[in-house]
Amino acid sequence: MPLIDCPDCGKKVSLDAPTCPECGCPIKIPHTQPPITGGRECPYCGAHAVGRVRGLQGIGEVFTAVLLFFIFFIPGIIYYVYKESVPYCSGCGRRVRK
């Protein structure tokens, strides 16, 4: 338990104590310490509880993910299937057109 000096009487007091046991002065965490919850600061509300979230958040992100899937992944599969249908030479590995 870290100890700090009481602002009124100067005695050593635990940071976990709500008040000084000697004089009853309320103990506050000094502002020089980083927030206990840690993390980055939210630009909207100033909270220090910003963390990583897994998954898609909101309809916009879901729509974007589905759109990218159909734009890139599906054409890639179609191209792969097409290329597999074209025969190739087992000697040199090149595709052979009819």
Image (tube, helix red, strand yellow):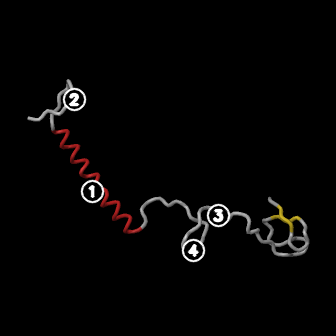
- Which residue is rendered at x = 83% and y = 62% of the image? 3
Q: Which of the labelled discs sits on residue 45, or is there none?
A: 4
Q: Which residue is mark 3?
A: 37
User: Considering the numbered disc 3 on the image, is that residue within a helix, a strand or a loop?
Assistant: loop
Total marks placed:
4
Dot 3 or dot 2, earlier in sequence? 3
Dot 4 or dot 3, earlier in sequence? 3
Dot 1 or dot 4, earlier in sequence? 4
Left or right side of 73 for 81: left
Q: Which residue is mark 2?
A: 93
- Gap in angstroms between the C-alphas marked 3 and 2: 59 Å
Q: Position of residue 2 (x, y in %)?
A: 80, 59
Q: Position of residue 78 (x, y in %)?
A: 21, 48
Left or right side of 28 for 9: right
User: Considering the numbered disc 1 on the image, is that residue within a helix, a strand or a loop?
Assistant: helix
Q: Residues within 10 Å of mark 3 (few under 14, many from 20)?
A: few
Q: Quarter of the image containing the N terminus?
A: bottom right
Q: Residues within 10 Å of mark 2 (few under 14, many from 20)?
A: few
Name the amino acid type tagged 1: Ile
Dot 1 or dot 2, earlier in sequence? 1
Q: Which residue is mark 1?
A: 71
User: Considering the numbered disc 4 on the image, is that residue within a helix, a strand or a loop?
Assistant: loop
- Gap in angstroms between the C-alphas marked 1 and 4: 37 Å
Image quadrant in which you'd find residue 63: bottom left
Dot 4 or dot 2, earlier in sequence? 4
User: Considering the numbered disc 2 on the image, is that residue within a helix, a strand or a loop?
Assistant: loop
Q: Position of residue 88 (x, y in %)?
A: 17, 31
